[in-house]
Amino acid sequence: MSLGIIGCERSGFPALCALGKEEPEIWDRIVEVFPVPCLGGVDEETILRILLRCDTLLLVGCPPASCRNAWGSTLAEKRVARVSQLLEEAEIPKRVFCVFANPNRLGELKARVVV
Amino acid sequence: MIVGERKPLREILESLSPYREVLVLGCGACVTVCLAGGEKEAREVAALLRLKGFAAEAASVERQCEREFLVPLREKIPAFQAVLSLACGVGVQTLSEVFPGIPVLPGLNTSFMGAPLAQGVWEERCIGCGECIVHRFGGICPVARCAKNLLNGPCGGSKNGRCEVRPDRDCAWQLIYDRMKALGRLEELFVIQPPKNWGPSRFGAQRKIVREDVRR
Amino acid sequence: MQVALFGSDRSLPLWVTEELERMAFSFEVVTPEKTKALLPSSFVVVLGSALLTEDEVAELALRLGVNPLRVAVFPYEEVRDLPEEKCRTLWQGFLRSLVPPKIDVAAFRVTPTRRVLLYPEGDERLCEAFARARIPVVSFPSFVLSRKGVDFHVMPHDIPVGACVLIPSLQEEPPVVLPREVLDTGRVVALERLPQVLGLSSLRKMCVVLLVPSPHPYPEDWERIFALASLPPQGAQVLVLAEEVFVAREGFEEAFRRAREAGVLFEKLPLSRVSLSPSLDMRRVVVTYTPEKDPFPVRCEAHWLVPVSRKTCVLPPFDKVLLSDREVVLELPENPNLLPFATNIPGVFVAWGDVEDLVVTVSRYLEEGSIQEEGRVRVDAERCALCLTCLRSCPTGAIELSGDLKRCIAVNEALCARCGICAGLCPAKAITFEVVHRVLGNHRL
């Protein structure tokens, strides 16, 4: 199962690098990595377009309480919920998840990335 | 502005099932502003259709309800088997009049004429009755905003300023009363309103305006 | 294209140099000792860690004398231990993303005017503290603020100020309604007085229960609560019933962990689920509560009950004073990534807690400013439908209605945090961030 990752530059992307250092084998599954300034700016179209090239897409970003842009992570979470619903409605067997992580808090990301 | 809502995806997919090459056409006017059928939504639907195996493309025009904006699509349209229009009902019909040779499918339910209250919240304000009377009610329209269209005072069922039919909506008559009180014009509400003439409303026939002075 | 590789690691692996040559980049290696002779047009690639902050990168750019936009960080430290092939792919993608931006981007440093507006006027302690920090202070009973770049302008006097400090009023109320009988036991004590009270009695087998409401009390209160960690080792039992534990401050998370390790029990629950009654001998308070996780009520007898008051900070009616193009809703974000005392509007601070800390924060904001780039955000006037979605959703309030014609929104570059939220929400796709998506994989967005 191929994995795409959109990570915010503040938390998500560093977290991915930290996890990659810990468990280098994750890189074999990851086919796409996109660093973005904030998860709040990733629109539905981008998500769906990346999904064309992978089975699962993870949006990795700051926990909502510490998002520098106030509601960026919250917005991403809502958007992911909406896209997931769309995918389900259209019966497309691909999934999007929102994962909150930073280099000191890898648990959730690890659970999603490491098999 | 006209407020709409995208049709359930399942319904769209069902109507598109006979076709493969589809153009998703957004409209740059009202439905863009109400975040239902602009360029962004068109691209989103197209991306989704591509995931579903369609050869979909997205485009958007300034206003789908005017022929002049649609004419530049003449070269583009024949490459597709169907057009999914994300405009309001007016846009969909203009589109199918301009391009009679291609099936035009609606992707949006046209909901009402309203205003945004906050980011992501829209509420109806006008039903287009054809004879505006809001000045008699402190600028609040009882025809559109009272569930029972009452013109001569409230029904008596409102609770804490909320409508008894839909408790999450404000009672229009409470708003009218508060507004008229603030304006010091309460006594105007004692004037008996005659029965409303629904002739100019949509109950007559299809409405039409012809202005000879500007007509060519 | 010229690339300078910045890093202390002199023996670079082959994949670094080979890929550079293959993509026809000419390059040189720069180390912290040897930083001279950089062409102004060259790019600097820092072979560093993904954990380098924006400030560190900006500082480096300043030291090397290059445009900060031309400095890019490759997470070399994280990547170098990977299999060579993977490194090569990541490095390739990274180099491809270095192609110069399509639009002209000018980077400049913005520093706000060194003057602070206090509202409402007349707080002597604050005025003195600012005077000591040599920051001029202005105050007016009523005014209109408008924003020009990073400064506020106080109208009608047209005085530029770099920051506004709002002085809130404080409202205190007990966290729960304390029944008369409970008060009669004489076992209810304020948090400030707790150490004195405990100092007089033996701590062995003593049970202290704290009721902590949300919105959270002042940070000083939490400092006092976390300091109770010294009690359990002496034989006392400490139970904190809190609606929320506040750890979003430097050192608090650590203090919270230490308190828990020392044996202070923290239970998160709505205080409405706590009931209080006196014990039969009227010398203790019986606290009964239902924890969130299991449905069985827990009962304990407290020798001391500490209700921490619910303190809410009521902001002055700032939105009525601040009048420009749009309505402003002021929020107090409890976000560790933002400056303390800051609000959702950059440059507006709220004076609560320690005055000295506030002055230090404000003066740092006024001195440091930030490196901004102009021209990164592009608004297509042809497409803009003026739906104002961006204006309503921008976290820093950087979107403005431009000029008199109001045909198109404008972005205040000095305030924009380049988060891309507006571009993501724009229904007409009128806002684009040219260099926002840097690509690491094999594809370009």
Image (tube, grey):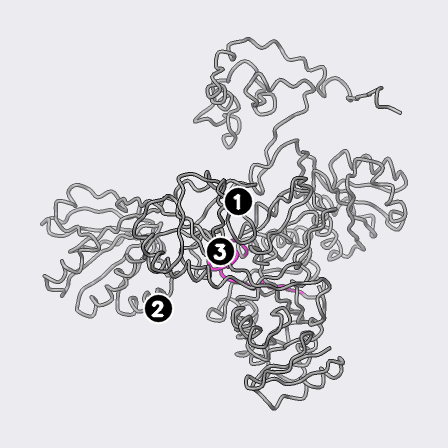
Q: Which residue is painted at 32% across and 65% down in the image? A: C256
Q: Nearer the viewer, mark 1 or mark 2?
A: 1
Q: Which residue is painted at 59% across and 77% down in the image? A: C64
Q: State which chain disc 2 sits on.
A: C
C283 inside magenta stretch: no
Task: Quickly name the residue at label 2.
Answer: C254
First in residue order: circle 1 vs circle 3? 3
Decide if residue B7 is in sight here: no
Indicate the quadrant where residue C437 lies. bottom right
Q: Position of residue B44 (x, y in %)?
A: 70, 52
Q: Position of residue C143 (x, y in %)?
A: 46, 40
Residue stretch rendered in magenta on the structure:
A55-72
Q: Tell me which amino acid carries mark 3.
A: Thr
Q: Which quadrant would the C terminus of chain B be assigned to in this image?
A: top right
First in residue order: circle 3 vs circle 2? 3
Q: Is residue C107 above or below residue B160?
A: below
